[in-house]
Amino acid sequence: MAAELFSLIDHLRAEKNLTDDALTMLYENRTPETDAYLYAAADAVRRESYGNKVFLRGLIEISNICKNDCYYCGIRRSNRQVARYRLTLEDLMACAAHGYELGFRTFVLQGGEDAYFIDEVVVHWVRALKCAFPDCAVTLSLGERSRQSYEALFAAGADRYLLRHETATEAHYRRLHPAAMRLSHRLDCLAALKDIGYQTGCGIMVGSPGQTWPNLLADLRYMQGLNPQMVGLGPFLPAQHTPFAHQKAGTLADTLWMLAVVRLMLPQVLLPATTALATLSPEGREAGLRAGANVLMPNLSPLSVRKKYALYDNKATLDGEAAENVASLFDWLKTLGYEAVVDRGDYRI
Ligand code: 5AD
């Protein structure tokens, strides 16, 4: 069996694809030995695309106010235990200036679907960032908006947009979200973002409640079809005061497996080793890089709000999130054989 799986992995690497049956065989019969082979193949493909570079993005969590009520998410509307906050433009510019000093050339503005952020506001914020830091990329992660809105933000200078699709399977989407939310709308948003010209990121939580292998397979097929420049992929982690507070977390092995397969299917993709992965296991971030990830997203949000942006429990931190530690992040990457990159780290066509 192992020999057969090794040859499937070789085939996946060469062809960037496998049949449903072959992927199922690889998923269901994997062993630590075949996984190690898979991660090595993903690592090799990442090296072919990007050498030993690891791209850094400064994450700024601009608001934890959200109109949605996703069952998994710690900042869902119904969670009354959350102290809500919203940064000001001054806060944002101060975080970005600090991040710029540390060497970051991409800022990711992430927030809940907060009604305050009408187009005029986001356009103003994006313009302010691009004007102060013209050599930086701006990534937005602000949820579902209209095509017109995405166009306005793109025209203002936003370069990239992250919007995880969460699951490509209708029934599973229903298990994770209240009826007011629609998978079709989420997928329309992603198609619009890509069409407008954003470097676009979709993604999922691995091990979310109710997720099955056919769901993961559908996610892989969806990603192949969208061909995004970025994929956000981390384990599901339970969040207190949510309907899924007592559900099991996704596993490290499943998350690494998905990261590696995504790397082999989409060789050029920008793929973060996520905070959720680091929260799941102290070795998570390193293991993610070894399985094909090539992006880290240290948190630049003001310390006063960090704890309030809790999508799940016990969120990990990363060296480099504080000025005095950024050198140690660079050193850490170096000891692992990677090189931290301070440029924008755009997708390679
Ligand atoms: N565990 C892991 N990831 C989560 N997210 C939200 N809640 C959780 C959780 N409990 C992820 C979702 C969302 C992204 C911003 O964070 O995939 O798209």
Image (spheres, grey):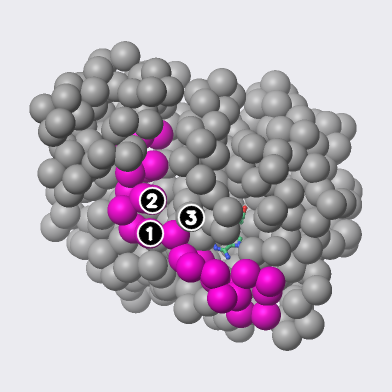
Q: Secondary structure at mark 2?
A: helix
Q: Is residue 246 magenta?
A: yes
Q: CA distance from mark 2 to mark 3?
A: 8 Å
Q: Residues within 10 Å of mark 1 (few under 14, many from 20)?
A: some
Amino acid type of the residue tagged 3 in the rendering: Gly
Q: Nearer the viewer, residue 80 or 94?
A: 80
Range drawn in magenta = 237-262
Residue at (38% x, 59% y) in the render: 251
Looking at the image, is mark 3 or mark 1 earlier in the sequence?
A: 3
Q: Residues within 10 Å of mark 3 (few under 14, many from 20)?
A: many
Q: Is residue 139 magenta?
A: no
Q: Horizontal placement of 251 versus 331: left or right?
A: right
What residue is disc 3 on?
207
What is the residue that sits farthest to the top in this orientation? 15
What residue is disc 1 on?
251
Amino acid type of the residue tagged 1 in the rendering: Thr
Task: Give coordinates of residue 242: x percent, y percent.
Answer: 68, 74
Q: CA distance from mark 1 to mark 2?
A: 6 Å
Q: Are marks 2 and 3 in contact (CB under 8 Å)?
A: yes
Q: Secondary structure at mark 1?
A: loop
Q: Secondary structure at mark 3?
A: loop
Q: Do we see residue 140 in this rendering?
A: no
The answer to which quarter of the image holds residue 81 is: bottom right
Q: Horizontal placement of 154 versus 328: left or right?
A: right
